């Protein structure tokens, strides 16, 4: 299975045989967005266009296969940036048509769940999935990844990774902000500042997230320090902010498992690379008797292998391929696993 991923700023081409990962080629345009502090859609689309064919060639070379050896093609058709998605979907259609192979248009979020099978084997189903990246923050109930994915909650404003990126900017750290905050936080005190935990009141929706109030609280705190002519303790602010995000994410994920009677939690998306998130999730899952699965960081961030992994699962379940006129859908609902 040849998988294409272009929903954001990574051009990903993966090749998977069964549950064996043969190639995972990724070209990222992240440096081109750094000076804007966030992904610029048009810049991402153009970068996909330039990277697409070389990335396919690189994946084929790594896997030691020719495009004609491929049995089927899978591509992210949504959700994501429209222009970026269009490049991947057009490329996948072209390869499918030229090679005479079936095409599977798949949901990006379901693909983040499927990728774990490449590292840890068959998915425990049902499971709860917490997907946290620069573009999404979702809690899903996954009774059967080929048949049924149910949304439990999502962010009502910023995505978790977006909060890391915005707070990093406030602290003078580079984009993308997750890794430098993670590093700075290692030397900081997570209890130095108590930042707000969004949507954790008794009347708040149990599984939705909000990170924009937290980002504003950090901004106000930093501004007050600067106005007073005091140095900003970057490590302490980074650690305290990170702790607020991680506390909410893990508490809600564990609660979702408990409420639904599910004993497996899977975490994916770029923020799943966060060391504090991994540590706190492991501790809280252990205490609650929940089995935790987190793919290695390279598989958590956007890549083509995750799309191929979902394609394999759909073929195994006997799902029909897509037609060659499938559209991209920037707001593809999470319930739509393939189309
Ligand atoms: O999944 P991804 O590569 O792309 C999408 O946004 O879909 O995720 C990128 C996001 C960025 O916001 C980045 O700051 C965040 O993941 N991230 C992290 C870490 N590494 C990446 N956030 C927190 N801690 C990290 N170690
Ligand atoms: Zn993603």
Image (cartoon, helix red, strand yellow):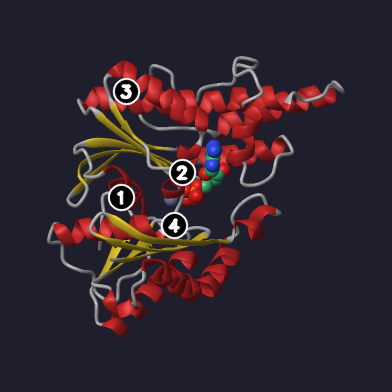
Return the disc, 3 or 1, that comes first in the chain's sequence: 1
Horizontal arrangement in the rendering, residue 137 relative to residue 37 (left or right): left
Return the disc, 3 or 4, that comes first in the chain's sequence: 4
- Label 3 and label 2: CA atoms lie apart by 24 Å
Residue in the foreground of this view, choosing between 9 and 136: 9
Residue in the foreground of this view, choosing between 237 and 166: 237
Residue bearing the label numbered 3: 255
Q: Is mark 4 within 8 Å of ligand 2?
A: yes
Return the disc, 1 or 4, that comes first in the chain's sequence: 4
Query: What is the secondary structure assignment of the residue under circle 1?
Result: helix
- Label 4 and label 2: CA atoms lie apart by 20 Å
Residue bearing the label numbered 4: 80
Query: What is the secondary structure assignment of the residue under circle 2?
Result: helix
Q: Residue at x 37, y 67 (%)?
A: 63
Horizontal arrangement in the rendering, residue 130 relative to residue 313 (left or right): right
The x, y position of residue 94, in whole percent, is: 36, 80
Q: Residue furthest right?
A: 229
**Residue 258 versus residue 12 in the image, above or below:** above
Return the disc, 4 or 2, that comes first in the chain's sequence: 4
Query: What is the secondary structure assignment of the residue under circle 3?
Result: helix
Specify few, some or many for label 2: CA neighbours under 10 Å numbering under 14, 14-19, or 20 or more: some
Write down the quadrant of residue 286 in the picture: top left
The x, y position of residue 126, in whole percent, is: 19, 37
Quarter of the picture containing the N terminus is: bottom left
Q: Which mark is residue 118?
A: 1
Does residue 204 appear anywhere in the picture?
A: no
Q: Residue at x 85, y 20 (%)?
A: 228
Q: Is mark 2 within 8 Å of ligand 1?
A: yes
Does residue 172 appear anywhere in the picture?
A: yes
């Amino acid at each position: 299975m040849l998988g294409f991923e272009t929903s954001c700023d990574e051009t990903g081409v993966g090749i998977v045989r069964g549950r064996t990962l043969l190639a995972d080629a990724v070209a990222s345009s992240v440096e081109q967005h750094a000076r804007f502090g966030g992904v610029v859609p048009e810049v991402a689309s153009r970068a996909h266009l330039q990277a697409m064919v070389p990335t396919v060639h690189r994946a084929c070379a790594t896997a030691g296969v020719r495009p004609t050896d491929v049995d089927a093609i899978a591509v992210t058709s949504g959700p994501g940036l429209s222009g970026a998605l269009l490049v991947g979907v057009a490329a996948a259609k072209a390869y499918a048509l030229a090679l005479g192979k079936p095409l599977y248009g798949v949901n990006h979020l379901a693909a983040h769940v499927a990728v774990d099978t490449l590292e840890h084997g068959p998915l425990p189903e049902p499971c709860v999935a917490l997907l946290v990246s620069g573009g999404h923050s979702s809690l899903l109930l996954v009774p059967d990844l080929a048949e049924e994915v149910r949304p439990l909650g999502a962010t009502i404003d910023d995505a978790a990774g977006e909060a890391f990126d915005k707070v990093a900017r406030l602290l003078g750290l580079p984009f993308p902000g997750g890794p430098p905050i993670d590093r700075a936080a290692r030397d900081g005190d997570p209890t130095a500042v108590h930042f707000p935990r969004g949507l954790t009141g008794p009347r708040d929706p149990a599984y939705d997230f909000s990170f924009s109030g937290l980002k504003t609280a950090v901004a106000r705190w930093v501004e007050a320090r600067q106005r007073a002519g005091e140095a900003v303790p970057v490590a302490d602010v980074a650690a305290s902010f990170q702790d607020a995000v991680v506390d909410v994410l893990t508490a809600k994920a564990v609660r979702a498992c408990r409420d639904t009677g599910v004993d497996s939690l899977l975490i994916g998306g770029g923020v799943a690379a966060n060391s504090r998130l991994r540590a706190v999730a492991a501790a809280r899952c252990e205490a609650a008797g929940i089995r935790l699965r987190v793919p290695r960081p390279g598989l958590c961030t956007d890549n083509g292998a995750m799309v191929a992994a979902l394609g394999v699962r759909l073929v195994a379940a006997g799902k029909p391929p897509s037609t060659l006129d499938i559209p991209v859908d920037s707001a593809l609902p999470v319930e739509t696993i393939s189309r």
